[in-house]
Amino acid sequence: MKEIKNEADYKDVMAKIDGLMAKGSDKVSKDELAEIRSMALAAQSYEQAKYVIEAPTTIVGMIEMRMFEMKLKQRDLAQKLDVSDAKLSLIMNGKQKPDVPFLKAVHTQLNIDANFLLEHA
């Protein structure tokens, strides 16, 4: 599969992928599966270059991103950080500033850069 260079190419590739996948997994040949994979990789490369997601700029944003990445619910996160659900809720809703023990736990348990935490606290 050649490189996708613009939105029109991208839409064309996605339409081809949809068409092949509409056949059903039991009716797609090995060659078609290889073609789907090749087109999907090209589409993924285009998406990663075109649709850049900005990194969070707040502590809460960074924590939310890590929660998503780690598939954690707020209750699970509170346990991981060894804080009460209420305290975590207050911090996440901007009603309480994070204290040093909380920031230390966020750094060690969620692997969030200490410099980022210090700059945004």
Image (spheres, rainbow, N blue to C red):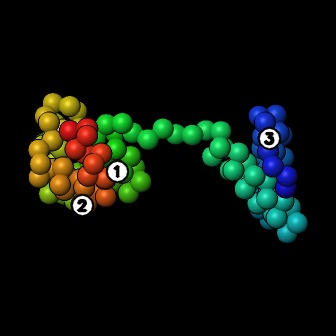
Instruction: Assign a secondary structure to mark 3.
Output: loop
Q: Nearer the viewer, mark 3 or mark 1?
A: 3
Q: Residues within 10 Å of mark 2 (few under 14, many from 20)?
A: few
Q: Which mark is residue 108?
A: 2
Q: Which residue, given by chain and number where applicable, does mark 1 sit on?
A: 67
**Amino acid type shown at disc 1:** Met
Label tally: 3
Q: Which residue, given by chain and number where applicable, does mark 3 sit on?
A: 5
Instruction: Assign a secondary structure to mark 2.
Output: helix
Residue 23: image quadrant is bottom right
Disc 1 and disc 2: Cα gap in Å? Answer: 14 Å
Disc 2 and disc 3: Cα gap in Å? Answer: 41 Å
Residue 111: image quadrant is bottom left
**Amino acid type shown at disc 3:** Lys
Do the residues bearing badges 3 and 1 touch, measured as CB atoms within 8 Å? no
Instruction: Assign a secondary structure to mark 1.
Output: helix
Q: Which of 35 and 28 is in front in this view?
A: 35
Instruction: Give the mark nearest the N terminus, 2 or 3.
Output: 3
Of the 4 image quadrants, the one containing the C terminus is: top left
Q: Where is residue 16 in the image (x, y as percent from the top left)?
A: 84, 46
Examine the rendered structure and indicate whether residue 50 appears above or below residue 107: above
